[in-house]
Image (cartoon, rainbow, N blue to C red):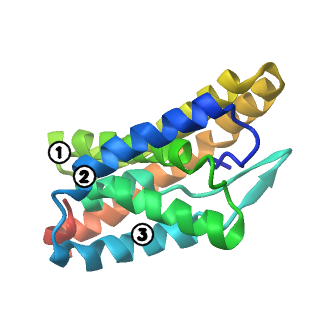
Amino acid sequence: MVHISDGILAPQIWITGYLITAVILFFTLRKMRADDIPRISIVTSAFFVASLIHVPIGPTSAHLILNGLMGILLGIYSYPAVFIGLLLQALLFQHGGITTLGINAMNMGIPALIAYYLFKIKKNPIMAGISCGVAVFLAVLLTSAVLILSGVEYYEIAILLLTAHIPVALIEAVVSAFVVATLLKVKREVIA
């Protein structure tokens, strides 16, 4: 559960999340072209569906995040894609919340951008795996940090969240390395 639900965060935290998200969306969306939209839509759909499959772990759950792979495939457009995917999940399935949409987008979108820039260092499957594993870990780390800032009652959940997502980060690293290896061979142009 990398989504934080409504009612958990203090207003100053979720408002800050919206402000940061608005700034990042402004800078990423102003470069978008109409012919980028189909690719962004497909990757956003995969993110949306993969995040709906949850494995319960105590009071939380773990699921694939795919934010690193989004970063590799979409580059700076991964942030708006994360935002749209999270908005749809909040509206349609009550995963996350509306007040926390900005902070949730920040927690998953910034690591997606970091994965994109890490992958640009050396575009190969190993770097893809590293980038995607780092993105998942950073998303969970940011979410845990926000929970810890929200009060002592969330400390245990934050630790459990970190622990539960270590295998997810490893699985996503391996899967992403194979996906990128395949794409580099057959459809190199889909990588940002």
Residue 134 visible, this angle: no
Tag 2–tag 1 contact (CB < 8 Å): no
**Amino acid under label 1?**
Lys
Q: Which residue is mark 3?
A: 44
Is residue 136 rendered to the left or right of residue 3?
left
Which amino acid is tagged 2? Thr
Please give the label number shown on residue 153.
none
Crowd class of label 2 (few under 14; some 14 to 19; many from 20; radius 10 Å): some
Q: Is residue 48 visible?
A: yes
Identify the image quadrant of residue 160: top right
- Which label's residue is closer to the chain start, 2 or 1? 2
| 38 relative to 161, above or below | below
Q: Is residue 77 above or below residue 147?
A: below
Q: Residue at x 54, y 63 (%)?
A: 87
Q: Nearer the viewer, mark 1 or mark 3?
A: 3
Q: Which mark is residue 28?
A: 2
| Cα–Cα span, label 2 and label 3 | 15 Å
Element type at mark 3: helix
Q: Quadrant of the C terminus?
A: bottom left
Q: Of callouts 2 and 3, which one flags the residue occurring earlier in the amino acid sequence?
A: 2
> Which residue is drawn at the image coordinates 66% and 54% (left, top)?
96
User: Is 74 above or below relative to 120?
Assistant: below
Camera-near label (2 vs 1) is 2
Residue 140 position, x and y percent, is: 57, 38
How many marks overall? Answer: 3
Q: Are marks 2 and 3 in contact (CB under 8 Å)?
A: no
Mark 1 — residue?
A: 120
